[in-house]
Image: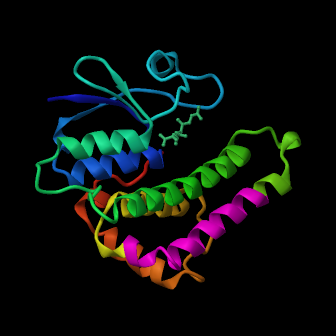
Amino acid sequence: MTIRLFHSPASPYVRKVLVTAHERGVADQVELLESAAWPVKRDPNIVRYNASGKVPCLLTEGDQPIFDSRVICAFIDSLGDAQGTVYPSGADRFRILTLEALAESTLDACLLCRYEVALRPEELRWQLWHDSQMEKVDSGLDALEGEWFDLLSRDFNAGSIAAASMLGYLDFRFVDKDWRADHRRLAEWFAEVSKRPSMQETMPKG
Ligand SMILES: N[C@@H](CCC(=O)N[C@@H](CS)C(=O)NCC(=O)O)C(=O)O
């Protein structure tokens, strides 16, 4: 089966999807489609399938769109061989889904900061708004370093994948942010999981 993916090589949400595909052994089934997702001047090729115009957006063989990244990850997980899953069932399922949501909301705040700096005309920028998003990033990092760390580091589940993609994005776009200084455990964990082939094969570019 071939699944097509509107993607961007810099997108951390796309990275989540690709890491999941590698972890589940289906990366060779993913065909990357050219696309130009951007909050202004959206790409009509994506909008045709995903009204938000965002990537990732997956197309099934029957041309059915699947988005957003969390839904795509769950879909890709279901394609992998029956023995593994990044969304274990049972008692931890909703904890892992919540961990994934935590990592993703942290990532959302990163992206809002990035757009503010990279996209918004300088005279329209609002420092308080930017700093408030960065506070969300810091709270998210604290939570991952703290109460969520055991679940995060127990295995490489969907929540761990989302967190690793978020940390990779911080290193990629926020090179001056020394998040490791106050999050030693998280930094060690990230160094370790970054060695996984799924992470090595999906380094952000752009
Ligand atoms: N919640 C979405 C977020 C996806 C997202 O924001 N993607 C960015 C690229 S990193 C995008 O397409 N931005 C274009 C836009 O905001 O219109 C998901 O998890 O897939």
Residue at 18% from the left image edge and 41% from the top image edge: 79
Classify 151 as above or below 45: below
Q: Residue furthest front?
A: 91
For residue 41, what is the image quadrant? Answer: top right
Segment tinted magenta in the rendering? 131-152
Q: Residue furthest right?
A: 123
Question: What percent of the width, then of the height, locates residue 88?
Answer: 26, 59
Chosen colour scheme: rainbow
Is residue 9 among what the camera can see?
Answer: no
Residue at 53% from the left image edge and 60% from the top image edge: 102
Classify 17 as above or below 147: above
Magenta stretch, main secondary structure, is: helix
Question: What percent of the width, then of the height, locates residue 99?
Answer: 46, 62
Is residue 44 among what the camera can see?
Answer: yes
Relative depth, front residue between 199 and 153: 153
For residue 64, what is the image quadrant? Answer: top left
For residue 61, what is the image quadrant? Answer: top left
Relative depth, front residue between 186 and 80: 80
130 on left or right of 45: right
Q: Is residue 74 magenta?
A: no
Relative depth, front residue between 49 and 200: 49
Classify 89 as above or below 48: below
42 on left or right of 86: right
49 on left or right of 72: right
Residue at 37% from the left image edge and 55% from the top image edge: 203
Question: What percent of the width, then of the height, locates residue 68?
Answer: 45, 37
Q: Across the whole image, how many numbered discs are drawn on residues?
A: 0
Quadrant containing the N terminus is top left
Classify 63 as above or below 28: above
Q: Is residue 133 magenta?
A: yes
Question: What percent of the width, then of the height, locates residue 118?
Answer: 68, 44
